[in-house]
Every structure is written in structure tokens, then in C-alpha cells.
Amino acid sequence: MTQLSSPGGGPTPPGSLSVTMRPRDRAMSWWRTPTARRYVFGYTLLAPAVLYVALLVGLPFLFSLYLAMSDASVSAPIARFVGLENFKSALENAVFYTALRNSILFTVGAGIMKGLLGTTLAFLLLQPFKGRKVVRALVVIPFTLPIAVSVLGWKWMFDSQFSVINWALSRLNLIGGYGSPDWPVWLGQPGLALLSVMFVNVWRGFPFSAIVLLAGLTSVPPEIIEAAKVDGANFITRFRKVIVPMIAPILFIGSAFDTVFTLSDLSIVYLLTNGGPDGATEILPTLAYNTGIRGGALGRGAAISLFLFPLLLPAMILLLRTLRRKQY
Amino acid sequence: MATVTAAAPRTQRQRDIRRHVFIYLGLSPFLVIAVFPIFWMVITAIKQDADLYLMDAVPFWFRQWPTWHNFDFLFHNTSYGAWIVNTMLISFWVSAITILTAVPAGYALARLRLPFAENLGIGIFMTYLVPAIILFIPLARVVSTLELQDSWWALVVVYPTFTIPFCTWLLMGFFKTVPFEIEEAAMVDGCGQLGALVRVVLPVSWPGIITAIIFSFTLSMQDFLYSLAFVSVSEEKPVPLGVATELIRGDIYFWGSLMAGALLVGVPVAIIYNLFLDKFITGITGAAIK
């Protein structure tokens, strides 16, 4: 019988079959087995991407740790090691605390607004209605426009004299005319300026929250919602006990992305106020840019931007854990 | 009988109409907030200069004839033409580098059952989240070592730091959906592993590759910090930076041409991005949905 020819009976993997047939191959080095060749091929294909990222993200990150502990500047290419001096001088600077406070306020405040608006919009877009595709395409415009482009539009709308917002408010008799004491100078008054930059961030980010949430909501099988309805769960209970746990991974990923990009975004504040008036809208990114590139103090700038890292870390860990938990 | 059957559809229709009214009412503030700034930018771009500053009349429409003057100004009095060319060339080279590295990497991670493939994939994706604001200072050194400061080539080197991670992740997800059988059939027919990839897998993967090219382009257009930090020569700037920095002279803002220049590239980018937005969202959340 043919079964006799295979030792040990049962189905034999092709690898061991060749061993019994051609004993010489047993001496063949591991590097020439199909598995090894697949690995070599695979890691060769991976190498360019991994090297690029390692050389231009990994190394620069380590290099920024080094720069932050040196007195490197644009004018003097040879840097001395200064230890934690740059971090210390940042911590002794009052502007740094304003920037840190604004960064956190900005990220948390805008994050809550984006969450609320995004949730409302997502539930509206979840309903079937006529023209849904058109509405969706229009409502995501803020997110799809290049950020520098839309911020310039807002700068014009926040103009101190020709602001269209003020024109409308004035026509509605909510404020007086130009020059009257209640005429808001959006980017020129400390409190208003901070609100304005946050508003632009919310404007840009709420479509993203809505679309991410929508992607999550549509991934929940309708049978599960129906089952919960049958069991007597009302809308709030269904949302809290069924929908949120099911879409939690997507919510985590979405908010991790949003947090990282909000916390590290320079362009809105840089273009609208550049930290002004009088440092009222200074955030860590603008402070790092103005110190490191404008001021030429690379070491001090690197130290300031590294203060962002502990703030970003929770978001990154959250993302990492969400992605890893999904690997079965 | 007749009245019942006639009444039933009418209430159904009424309910439907009422539902639509509620939804549109709920959506209208979102629509106004999302679209008004764009409308305002468009109308500013084609208004005559004097018309911009007439605050007594309703500013939402024209009191003087619309004009193309601002677009003329861009092309004749600024380096706008050069910025467009720079943007196109940057996008081309960034896409080329991204495709040449991310396609093989995505394929290897998705297909070759490599040890640590999942972790490597997550590792590469995580680098997408290391923000420019942490990397721009050390990268400034890299750029000056390569003697690329004040040249758009600096951006060609730097932009792949975010397009490669994102596109590798995107393509990894994409390659997982290509059936294994076609590859195995090719290998039975005598193709090597590379042959199977080039002759069989790549030809059916062009939708994924196009998506990756689109994102190399749109993500490059979203950048502001790198171009601001590395390129200060007017002729070498990409459009977003050029518009934001060169059309403002001291305290004088050329609002009309600012809006014209911003929209001329912003609108096409927004349209393309809009069409591919779902792919972007699946790209970043895909792992969580599956």
C-alpha cells in the first residue's frame, strides 16, 4: 500500500518528504529553504521603507534628544553639551507656562467641541434622507482643504475692520459699528484670540470626528441594535451600553489622531496670531518654532518641542494598544 | 375602506416630510458653518479691491463687476506660476519615493507571513504619529547637511517621512484583500515570488496604488511647518507656503489675490480628497473595524 511509503503514517508535509527521498539535502543550509528565501525576499522588500523611516524619523528623534541637551544654534555649527540646561531655561520662562497651558486648554477644549459637534453630525448623517451624499460632501470641506488655505480665509473673516462676522453682528444690532467699544477685534483681544484659534481648529476638525464616528456606527450590525431594542433598551442605554463599547476601538483611534494633530499643529496659530496678542495664544509649537528656527537657538527649540512628547504619549499608547488588541 | 387606504399613505408621506424637515434643520447650521468660509473666499477672490471695503452695503454680493484681476496679479506680479510647478514636482517625486518603498513594504507585511510582520506594520504606522513639530529641528540639520536648504528638494526628502508610514499601512490593508489564489497559480506556472508580485499582484492592485499616490499628493499639500522651516526663497516655495507668506507685505494684505491663490489649489485638492475621504478613514480605522 502507498501508505507504507510515508513514515509515521498520516499526511506528510512536503518538506520532510524531500528529506526522505533525497538524503543529501539534509545538509543543505537553512538559508536555501523556501521559508528562508521567503524571509529574505520579504525583508528585502521591507528594507527601503523601514530604512527611510528609521533614518528620517527614528534618528532625527534621537538627534533631537541630543540637540536639546546642547547649545546648538543656526550660526554656530559646533555644539557643546549643556545637559538639562535648555529644559531648565524653558521651565524658568513664564512664556513657556502660558504656551503649555494654552496647548492643553486648546487641545482639550477643542477636542470636547469636536466630539460634541461630530457626534451630533454623525447621527444626523446616519439617517436616510434625500441629498445625503451632497450634504456629506459639503460638510467635510473644512477637513479636506489644505490647512494653510482655509486659515487664510479665516484670517480675512477675523479682520479687525472688515470682518464679515462683525458686519453681520452689527447689522443684527448685537454690536455697535466699527470703532464702538463693543466691536470685537477677534485676533487682537487676548481672550477672543484664543477662542478664535480654537474655533478654527474645531471648524476644521468636526467633520473628521463625524466621519470617523459614522464609519464606526455603520459598522455596528443592525441586528444587534434591534436585539437591544427588543430587550427594552432606550436610545440612551443603547448608545451607552451597546454602540459605544462596539465602536470604542474606532473612537480611540480617531481621538488619538485628532489629539496628536491638534497638539502639534502650528499653522492655525502661526498664521492667525503668531502667538499674539502679547503671548495670549502662544502654544508649544509656535514657541518651539520661534525659538528654534526664527531665533536660531536649535537646542532650546528642540527642548521645547520635546515637552510635547509626554503630552502626546498617552494618545500614542492608546492607539498602539487599540491596534495590538485587534491582532488575533 | 376607501378613506382608510387613502389616508394611510398620506400620513406616511407627512411623517416622511416632517422627518426630512427635522434633519435638514439639524444639518443647516453645520452646512452654513462648513461652506460659508468657502463662499466668502470665492467672492473675495473675484471682487474688485474697492468693493471689498464697502461696509455700508450687503457684502455677500457684488456692487462692482466681478473681476479676474486678482488671478492676473498672481501670475504676473508674484511667483505663483513657479509655486504651482514646485508643488507639482514635489508631489511627483514624493509619490514616486512613496510608491517605490510603500508598495513592496505593504506587500511584504500583508503577504509573506514574516515573523514580527504585524508589529513591524504597527511600528511603521506609529511613526506617522510622530509629529513634524518634534522632528523639524533635527531635520533642519539633516536638510542643511544634504545642502538642500532653500530648495524644494528638501521637502521631497522630508515629506516621505509621513507618506511612507501612511501609505504602507493603507497598502498593507489593501494587499490583504487580494486573493492568495492568483499568486499561488502564478507560482505554480513557474513565476518566482518576485515574478508573481510584478506580473500578477501589481496589475490587480492599481486601485490601491492610485489611492496611495492621491494621498502622497494630498498629505503633502496639508503640510505647512516643514515648508515654512526649510524653504525661505520665494521661487522655491510650494503654493500653500507661497500664498501664506509672499502675499502679505508688512501690514498690507492683498486679500483678493490671497484668496484667489489659496482657492486655486485648495479647491482641486479638496475635491480629490473628498472623493477619497472614505479610503482615508478606512486607512486609519480599518484595523479597528475588521
Image: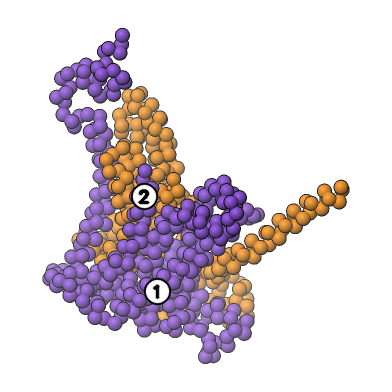
Residue B273 position within the rendered picture, expressed as x and y whole percent measured from the top left: 47, 55
Question: The chain drawn purple is chain what?
Answer: A
Residue B221: x and y in percent read 40, 59
Quadrant that contains the C terminus of chain A: top left
As drawn, the chain in orange is B
Write down the quadrant of residue B91 in the picture: bottom left
Asked if residue B243 is positioned above or below residue A282 in the image, the reply reads above
Report if residue B76 is visible in the image: no
Q: Are marks 1 and 2 in contact (CB under 8 Å)?
A: no
Three-letter amino acid code at disc 1?
Leu
Specify few, some or many for label 2: CA neighbours under 10 Å numbering under 14, 14-19, or 20 or more: few
The chain holding disc 1 is A
Q: Is residue A117 above or below residue A186?
A: above
Front in this rendered view, residue B129 or B162? B129
Q: Amino acid at mark 2?
A: Arg
Where residue A325 is drawn, which disc sits there?
Answer: 2
Name the residue located 44 percent from the left edge and 67 percent from the top edge.
A111
Residue pictured at 24% horizontal, 17% vertical = A7
Residue B213 image offset from top left, x and y in percent: 40, 49
Vertical comparison of A88 with B194: above or below:
below
Where is A3 relative to A205, above or below? above
Say whether mark 2 and mark 1 are on the same chain: yes
For the residue pair A10 and A38, the one nearer the viewer reads as: A10
Q: Secondary structure at mark 1?
A: helix
Q: Residue at x 74, y 53 (%)?
A: B12
Residue B154 appears left or right of B269 = left
Q: Secondary structure at mark 2?
A: helix
